Image (cartoon, helix red, strand yellow):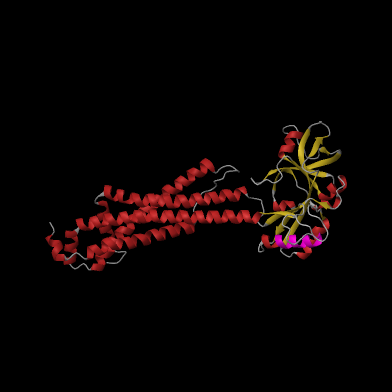
């Protein structure tokens, strides 16, 4: 009698349906275990997707670099000296640090904010004003609502154009008014609006009450020369941001006569560390979820084994008759193991359907907005396959206990059973 034998499956079906209430109660443990396992894995994936959505549009292999005051005297210079970056530093870093892919030098009007006024309406907004290159969009993507972002032609021709954030638009224009082609005045200088934007993610460095102008236009309009406020730096995908960061700082320390051990002269922020930390957190959480789910599944499968031990005892007379009629221990063992597999598999299938329904409900309830921290909580096909293979494997191992108990029953003793 092989595994695909009709009589085998008929006997398995008859045995499991003989006491439906007990069969159902037996499967509850496995159903609950699969719901926990798939639910936890799905929730972890949903959290990871939420993090990915929060950081969408932000380059994971990027960093910011700026200057501070020196903290150590060096080569006749006193501590507390300030350092000013320039465009020459951009070219120097590009030529000396091979890990660097793109550098976008930036400058800001004043220390913090500049005042923007609309020429015709007299409205004002306290907006941050940045001089930027188009490459800044590679580090922090802007979602354009109307028009466009700064382009290379704007840089080369030093056009007096600007891109404004949605909050700045609300302060400067009437609702529904088209800002494209309109003029605004920044510190007495007119700029033409060529685009409006809103944040593309929840990591929003500049805010939406912001105005971007071409870097070269900023230089001439506000007389900033070759001054650079700070740099947004994109590192090659296969290179380490930390390595590039150290090389850049060492290079600038040599140029500006800063002590090699001075850790405060140049400030930086490495975004890759944030993403590495998040990935490590979600990986540990996935492992913990799988660990908890597996032990819960093991408890459910053990319950199946205990019930099968009871059924073996109840079927002692039946097993004795089958043994007397020539059934081999292999046949008896195979039937008991198949009963364990069938119980576990169908219970797992029901648990999987329930858990998918729960995850879908969570997604509908909490994951349908752009800033949702819990998005698309699904499980991968690999996770499903591994879970089911593990579940069936455990059912086989646990099923061996009642199966071995059954084959140890001697026919003559079984036939004497009342």
142 versus 386 height, above or below? above
170 left or right of 88 in image: left
Which quadrant of the figure has residue 321?
Answer: bottom left
Q: Is residue 281 magenta?
A: no
**Residue 17: % across, % down:** 26, 51
Q: How far across and how far down the image is residue 244, in percent?
A: 70, 62
Q: Position of residue 54 (x, y in %)?
A: 61, 47
Q: Which residues are magenta?
A: 245-257
Screen quadrant of the N terminus: bottom left
- Report the label total: 0
Image quadrant where one finds the C terminus: bottom left
Q: Is residue 93 visible?
A: no
Most prominent secondary structure in the magenta stretch? helix
Quarter of image, res 238:
bottom right
**Residue in the foreground of this view, choosing between 175 and 395:** 395
Pick whichever, 391 or 174, lies toward us: 391
Residue at 19% x, 62% y is: 319
């Amino acid at each position: 009698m092989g595994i695909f034998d009709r009589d085998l499956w008929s006997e398995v079906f008859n045995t499991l349906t003989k006491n439906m209430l007990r069969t159902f109660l037996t499967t509850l443990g496995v159903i609950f275990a699969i719901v926990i396992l798939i639910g936890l894995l799905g929730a972890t994936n949903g959290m990871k997707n939420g993090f990915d959505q929060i950081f969408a549009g932000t380059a994971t292999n990027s960093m910011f670099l700026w200057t501070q005051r020196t903290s150590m005297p060096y080569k006749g210079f006193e501590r507390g000296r300030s350092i000013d970056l320039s465009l020459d530093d951009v070219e120097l870093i590009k030529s000396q640090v091979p890990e660097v892919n793109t550098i976008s030098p930036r400058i800001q009007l004043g220390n913090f904010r500049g005042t923007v006024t609309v020429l015709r309406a007299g409205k004002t907004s306290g907006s941050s004003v940045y001089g930027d290159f188009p490459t800044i969009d590679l580090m922090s993507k802007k979602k354009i609502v109307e028009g466009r972002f700064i382009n290379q032609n704007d840089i080369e021709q030093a056009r007096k154009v600007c891109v404004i954030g949605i909050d700045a638009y609300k302060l400067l224009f009437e609702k529904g008014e088209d800002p494209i082609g309109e003029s605004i005045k920044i510190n007495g200088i007119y700029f033409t609006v060529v685009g409006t934007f809103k944040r593309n993610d929840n990591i929003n460095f500049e805010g939406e009450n912001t105005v971007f102008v071409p870097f070269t236009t900023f230089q001439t309009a506000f007389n900033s020369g070759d001054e650079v406020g700070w740099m947004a730096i994109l590192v090659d995908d296969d290179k380490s941001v930390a390595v590039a960061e150290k090389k850049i700082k060492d290079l600038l320390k040599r140029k500006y006569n800063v002590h090699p051990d001075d850790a405060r002269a140049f400030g930086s922020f490495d975004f890759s560390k944030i993403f590495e930390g998040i990935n490590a957190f979600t990986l540990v959480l996935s492992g913990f979820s799988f660990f908890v789910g597996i032990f819960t599944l093991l408890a459910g499968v053990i319950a199946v084994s205990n019930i099968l031990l009871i059924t073996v005892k109840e079927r002692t007379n039946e097993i004795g008759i089958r043994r007397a009629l020539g059934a081999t221990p292999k046949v008896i063992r195979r039937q008991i193991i198949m009963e364990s597999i069938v119980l576990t598999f169908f219970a797992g299938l029901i648990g999987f359907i329930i858990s998918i329904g729960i995850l879908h409900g969570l997604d509908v309830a909490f994951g349908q907005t752009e800033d949702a921290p819990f998005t698309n909580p699904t499980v991968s096909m690999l996770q499903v396959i591994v879970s089911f293979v593990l579940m069936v494997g455990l059912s086989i191992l646990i099923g061996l206990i009642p199966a071995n108990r059954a084959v140890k029953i001697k026919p003559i003793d079984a036939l004497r059973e009342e």
